Image: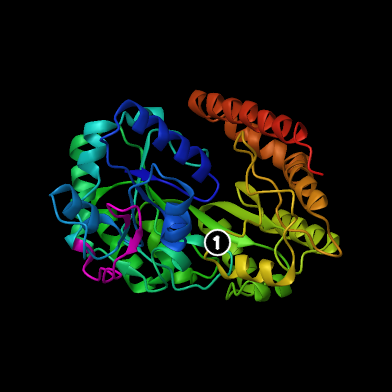
Amino acid sequence: MIHTSTPSFKSDCKTARMIKEVNPKARIGFIGSQVAVQPQESLAAENAIDFVARNEYEFAIRELAAGAKWEGLAGISYRDGSGSIVHNADREILTDMDKLPSVLPVYQRDLKIENYYGGYLKHPYMSWYTGRGCKSHCTFCLWPQTISGHKYRTHSIPYVIDEVKYMKANFPQVREIFFDDGTLTDNTARVEELAKELGKLGVVWSCNAKANVPRSTLEIMKDNGLRILLVGYESGNQKILQNIKKGLLVDVARRFARDCHELGILVHGTFILGLPGETRETIRETLNFAKEVNPRTLQVSLAAPYPGTFLYNQAKENGWFATDTELLTDGGTQIAPLNYETLSHTEIFEAVEWFYKKFYFRPSKIAEIVGEMMTAPEMLMRRLREGVEFFNFLKAREDIIVS
């Protein structure tokens, strides 16, 4: 089984061909949003792929591994004996998430967790999901539109707590848990209940959040071990937020940021440049907003219209794609695929570096980072490592020529 995506598909196909060369009898299946959205095109593009498992694929793969016949097996598309591509019926979406086995025993068997770093997380950390789906309808967001859907389906609280207890018993070195649900705070009653149970276990934890969490909920989360939130602000311009169906008011995001600062909750903020409606002025507006809400760290990405998303269809219909660009370079660096009449893809690409420098290279932020580095040797080494990575990132971007 190979997990693929639109940017990695060509490379993954090369891997599949190499496997077939070593073992021609190998059966190779692909999973991921690329093949969920384009099963016909994916199978037609590469003869080394024998089948793809669409959408939620765990039980389909388990049945295949147990020897189930491919004919009629829900949720897969495959190449039959004659070479024809067959699409079986969709598999019913899983509603009882507790039927899924925990991933933690796999981590214990196969991973050395000390090898994995998260720039905004304590080291070593551990990450997993407590649910799938996201209620928001952001036009650019891949997973709810292709795999998981817009209904937030969750493990029960006892299931999650049992996993945390397993982690504490088997990974005592873990210093932080990151719950990777698209938006753990989508269900405030559940996240409050979960936080209170996590507090009893004395763990440090973090999660993804939308910038609209009520202060009362933030207080409960903070009081029970929450350290940092990963927050998708995306833009500081209200019209762009409306264009992408973010379902968020800029003033609400400001209030949320203020609450986090006052409560001592750290924020890693994420922003996207090149969304529909972007101009030079809105980029400056978003930078000013980022400085105002002042997350501890941030990530600036380029709008990426993946197949299967509303943004992809919108870009196709409006002719926004720059014909000479894809989503990534061969080296894995993100490039700007969208081109507007008032803002070229080259300008959008170059704005990312400008944004980073304007945010980080200001006296108050430098003082904040240096002060943090002085708190502990571990933090000093961590920030130095991240600094090297950051400048390497900027250097890699400078080496890219976007025509």
Which of the 4 image quarters holds residue 23?
top left
Q: Nearer the viewer, residue 156 or 132?
A: 132
Pick the quarter of the image with the N terminus.
top left
Q: Residue 14 in the image: x percent, y percent?
A: 47, 35
17 over 204 or under it: above or below? above
Q: Residue 220 in the image: x percent, y percent?
A: 38, 64
Q: How is the image coloured?
A: rainbow
Task: Say whether residue 41 is left or right of residue 62.
Answer: right
Task: Say whether residue 195 is left or right of residue 318.
Answer: left
Q: Residue 211 in the image: x percent, y percent?
A: 55, 66
Point 68% across, 63% down: residue = 235
Was residue 85 drawn as part of the magenta stretch in this picture? yes
SS of the residue under disc 1: loop
Q: Which residue is mark 1?
A: 307
Point 44% across, 57% down: residue = 33
Task: Say whether residue 4 is left or right of residue 78.
Answer: right
Q: Which residues are magenta?
A: 78-98
Point 72% across, 68% down: residue = 276
Q: Residue 249 in the image: x percent, y percent?
A: 63, 75
Which of the 4 image quarters holds residue 73?
bottom left
Was residue 392 drawn as part of the magenta stretch in this picture? no
| Residue type pointed to by label 1 | Pro
* Residue 188 in view (yes/no): yes
Q: Nearer the viewer, residue 338 or 112?
A: 338
Point 67% across, 28% down: residue = 392
140 over 80 or under it: above or below? below
* Residue 160 in view (yes/no): no
Classify 10 Å Cα crowding around label 1: few (below 14), some (14-19), many (20 and above): many
311 over 61 or under it: above or below? below
Pick the quarter of the image with the C terminus.
top right
